[in-house]
Image (cartoon, grey):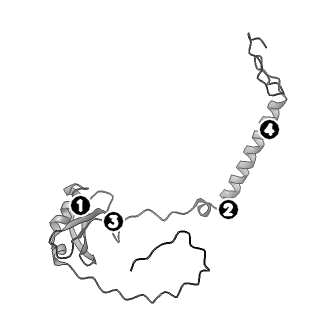
């Protein structure tokens, strides 16, 4: 049965949504022997983005879903200790053809990672905030003093003040 969507339907009061059913237990995915055994296809997939010398000998396979596995290879790039190259392999039901779905680099359990980002307001101490406020107030005072000093100063020769009516004054050598 197909469901139709009516665009100009009058608005009806919305009743509260029924309680969500209890989550069903997921079964453990079946290990696909064809995908697990195809290490050569997984390695060839990773070699599309990495040099063969950057792919280590360490190898693991994790089963994600039925007919979907992830092959993990040790990364030997300097600075990437604990990282793994991965290639996800899948196949269609009743098919013998293995497909490389995705390749990339993932951090392992002992990988060096950047620290969690902390906003500036949480990183700065109260003393630093007070110093910044003081510096900002001093900068504003200096700007105000500089602006006040230039208000009373005589214009330099050749400088012309704009007329108060907003018109542009004639340049030297022009008629008004």
Question: On the picture, is 28 further left or further right than 140?
Answer: left
Q: CA distance from mark 2 to mark 4?
A: 29 Å
Residue at the image position 25 percent from the left and 60 percent from the top: 76
Residue at the image position 27 percent from the left and 82 percent from the top: 29
Circle 3 residue: 106
Circle 4 residue: 145
Circle 1 residue: 46
Circle 2 residue: 126
Q: CA distance from mark 3 to mark 4?
A: 57 Å
| Rendering coords of residue 97 (x, y %) | 16, 68
Quick check: is 75 in the magenta stretch? no
Residue at the image position 67 percent from the left and 62 percent from the top: 126
Disc 1 vs disc 3: Cβ atoms closer than 8 Å?
Answer: no
Say above or below: 11 vs 160. Answer: below
Q: Residues within 10 Å of mark 1 (few under 14, many from 20)?
A: many
Residue at the image position 44 percent from the left and 62 percent from the top: 114
């Amino acid at each position: 049965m197909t469901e139709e969507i009516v665009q100009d339907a009058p608005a009806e009061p919305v009743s509260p949504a029924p309680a969500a059913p209890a989550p069903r237990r997921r079964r453990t995915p079946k290990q696909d022997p064809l995908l697990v055994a195809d290490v050569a296809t997984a390695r060839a997939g990773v070699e599309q983005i990495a040099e063969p010398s950057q792919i280590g000998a360490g190898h693991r396979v994790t089963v994600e879903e039925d007919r979907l596995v992830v092959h993990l290879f040790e990364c030997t790039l300097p600075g990437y200790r604990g990282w793994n190259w991965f290639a996800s392999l899948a196949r269609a039901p009743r098919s013998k053809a293995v497909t490389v779905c995705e390749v990339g680099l993932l951090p392992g359990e002992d990988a060096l990672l950047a620290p969690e980002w902390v906003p500036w307001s949480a990183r700065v101490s109260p003393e630093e905030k007070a110093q910044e406020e003081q510096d900002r107030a001093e900068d504003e005072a200096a700007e105000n003093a500089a602006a006040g000093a230039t208000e009373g100063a005589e214009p330099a020769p050749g400088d012309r003040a704009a007329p108060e009516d907003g018109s542009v004054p004639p340049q030297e050598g022009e008629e008004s």
